Image (spheres, rainbow, N blue to C red):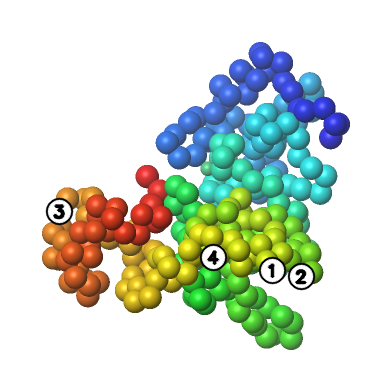
Amino acid sequence: MSDSAFHLDADTEARFWAKVEKTNGCWNWTAARIGNPLRGAFRVRGKMFHAHRLSFLLAHGSIPAGYNVFRSCGNQFCIRPDHLFLSQLTGRPRDSSKSTTMRRFMRLTLKTETCWLWTGTRWRGYGAIKMPIGEGRWRARPAHRVSYQLFRGEIPPGMFVCHRCDNPSCVRPDHLFLGTSAENTADAALKGRMRRGTESPGAKLTETEVIDIRRRMSGGKETVYEVAADYRVSPSLISQIQRGRIWRHVQPAP
Ligand SMILES: [Zn+2]
Ligand SMILES: [Zn+2]
């Protein structure tokens, strides 16, 4: 890849986007498909490009050496720019353990409009995921650190993975950044992390349950009393969640 940003002439770019069917979610490639696994393909100046790579190049100008473009939605024909992300995963067989980890990781992740919430085991508000440590043994590791390694790259020794958002159970790669121990502590204190959500003293619900409660209440068919009974909490708590008086930081995807 040259230093200058990737560019297509207007006609070619129009021809490219004409082959895309946009939905509210994914943007699906409708033209040529090549390879195994099959991917969308588009010919530019006599050379075949994977359509999702072209989409990424048009949006960001370049793909750094050693990185590949993956889809966060898991739809192999999607080329929507904000469903694409860079990773050092190669997808070749020698990386099968890393892609297996990726699949396990994504199965335990609930994407919302803002954060990606961890639905697996928690430890002190942070997600935890079991990782192999050799000889058939496993150890629980913080899910946000595993996310950073999967999507962004290695964590230098002694560095912490901190959150840009207020949500320790968030594992969204672009909500994470590397920091020192001091930054990590300051970060947590500044955001009052210990006083919200699942971490609040006496928290009775998890973020996933709050999302489910909002969905049920917005359906308009159930009363606060029915939903409260299901979660064994008070009707006033359900009503406060519904009106966004509490748990405001948890928002479901549309
Ligand atoms: Zn998609
Ligand atoms: Zn987040």
Read off the residue under disc 4.
189
Quadrant where the N terminus sits is top right
Label 2 or label 1, whichever comes before in sequence order: 2
Q: Residue at x 40, y 65 (%)?
A: 197
> In the image, is 244 to the left or to the right of 191?
left
Read off the residue under disc 2.
158
> Does residue 25 appear in the picture of this structure?
yes
> In the image, is 191 to the left or to the right of 247?
right
**Horizontal and vertical percent for residue 176?**
62, 56
**Horizontal and vertical percent for residue 24?**
42, 36
Label 3 or label 4, whichever comes before in sequence order: 4
Read off the residue under disc 1.
181
Identity, as a three-letter code, of the amino acid under mark 3: Lys
Q: Secondary structure at mark 4?
A: helix
Bin the neighbour count of mark 1 within 10 Å (Cα to Cα): few under 14, some 14-19, many 20 and up: some
Bin the neighbour count of mark 2 within 10 Å (Cα to Cα): few under 14, some 14-19, many 20 and up: few
Label 2 or label 4, whichever comes before in sequence order: 2
Identity, as a three-letter code, of the amino acid under mark 2: Gly
